[in-house]
Amino acid sequence: MKKISLLILISLPFFYSQGQKRSVDYKTSLTGFVANQKTLPFWAINNKHGLIPNGNGALLEIGLFSDFTNRHKIQFAYGISAAGFLSRPDNNVILDQLYASARWRNLRLDLGMIHPKEEYNGISSTNGNFIRSGNSRTFPGYNLNSDYMKVPCTKGILSIKFNWADYMMIDDRYVEDTRLHNKSAFLKIKPHQRWEIIVGLEHWAQWAGTSPDRGKQPSSFKDYIRIICAKEGGTGASVSDSINALGNHLGREHLAINYLADNYILSFYHDIPFEDGSGTDFRSFPDGTYCFYYGSKKKDQWITDVIYEFYYTKYQSGSRHDRPATPEEMEKQDPNSHFYGRKVLGGCDNYFNNGEYRSGWTLYERVIGSPFMTPGLSGGITRIINNRVIAHHIGMKGMAWQTTPYKLMLSYSRNYGTYGNPMKKNQFSGALEVTLPFKNLPFAVETGIYGDLGDLFKDNFGFTIKLSRKGKLIK
């Protein structure tokens, strides 16, 4: 972390020198939050990049950003933001973002800690990505990614984009210094100027680090190749990693269909999560996210954006990963195999959890993916305690009376825990955030009211007020 931060700080003056007329934007805000419980309601803390503490208090944020310019073939951008909070559970200062970016044609390289791009105008419960939603804090690393690039000889009908990234997970977790590999590839099919069909695959893998009970985990270049290819572990790997793939692998299969009208967009997308082979070959059906979205290009209307998302993660390829093999099945097995005597069914996918990397798909005690996958303490370790969920989410955004921007979030979920620790709890959570139309003040005033009602969380009501200002520091 220190090495990456130092490298970026050294690089910032170089990037600035590439365009002396480059503008620098600043953003600063002060937020106060209070609830009738010791904790805050669901939508008061989720999808906030892990910055809002789960208790009454106040948060100060400040950031400086310079975006890409078109003055050079290779363009540069950079940013830094930090937050400090005072709250009932904890007081802390957080380095939120620290990054430097370079762009050449359709390629971009991000170095450091940077927020994921906002999708669906901020009203999706997962930011359009079941695996990485913007719910947790950022992690340091690099990300080489591209815009869509046209495939030659297809008359613009086909285009592709990709990313390749590696990060460090630097929070206090079960396996210290866990590394994180990420890659994706997406194909866009455009049979007509108004229609787009997008299919893609995104893969994440936790690996390396130091386990308190198994010591240093495999971390050589050969092990990195195994991680890339999702191959079983070699020398030094645990029995589980020798049988299955080295590290903790997860990801999503993605399908999107977009209709592009002159003044609006209609979109459907479907994310299928996977933890192993049973997810990638559709044995986990009907698990996944199903979404319908409408977005208007006229931003002064009462309703400019509407989204409906349906989540089903209850099946997980069945309740059992394996079972005792029958005599007939054992006759066909290799007696020297780790699987001898067992019939692998491929179920009990246990989304966002892992036996080796026990902190699972969490960062600083927040889930990295969909916030409906609930983190909690289990055996003294923060992990996902509720991943079998049926949920409905409605998000809406608009401009009331052409003067007052608002955002509405309503969610209802039925929560079944995990196969190992089942529960049955219903939950409703809602939020209304409004920017008040005070034009004569030197800052914007945003308010939010939030509520929880159900069995998963305590019945709760919360309120926030945020004073924010942004502008040009250097023009």
Image (spheres, rainbow, N blue to C red):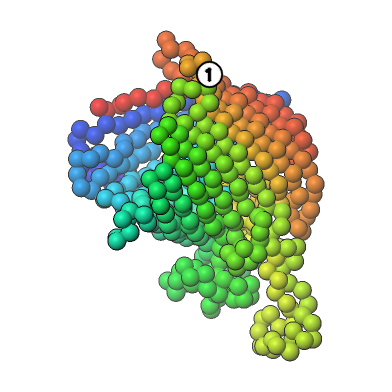
In this rendering, the answer to whether 152 lies above or below 172 is below
Q: Residue at x 66, y 84 (%)?
A: 337
Q: Is residue 139 left or right of residue 105?
A: right
Rendering coords of residue 401 (x, y %): 51, 15
In this rendering, the answer to whether 236 lies above or below 417 is below
Q: In which quarter of the image is residue 70?
A: top left
**Of residues 344 and 158, which is closer to you in this image?**
158
In this rendering, the answer to whether 469 lies above or below 88 is above
Q: Residue at x 61, y 42 (%)?
A: 309
Q: Residue at x 62, y 63 (%)?
A: 282
- The local secondary structure at tag 1 comes to strand
Task: Name the amino acid, label 1.
Answer: Ala
Q: Residue at x 38, y 45 (%)?
A: 193
Q: Mark 1 points at which residue?
A: 400
In this rendering, the answer to whether 73 lies above or below 444 is below
Rendering coords of residue 273 (x, y %): 59, 56
Check disc 1: other Cα within 10 Å, few if <14, some if 14-19, many if 20+: some
Please say whether residue 405 is visible from this viewpoint: no
**Of residues 404 and 133, which is closer to you in this image?**
404
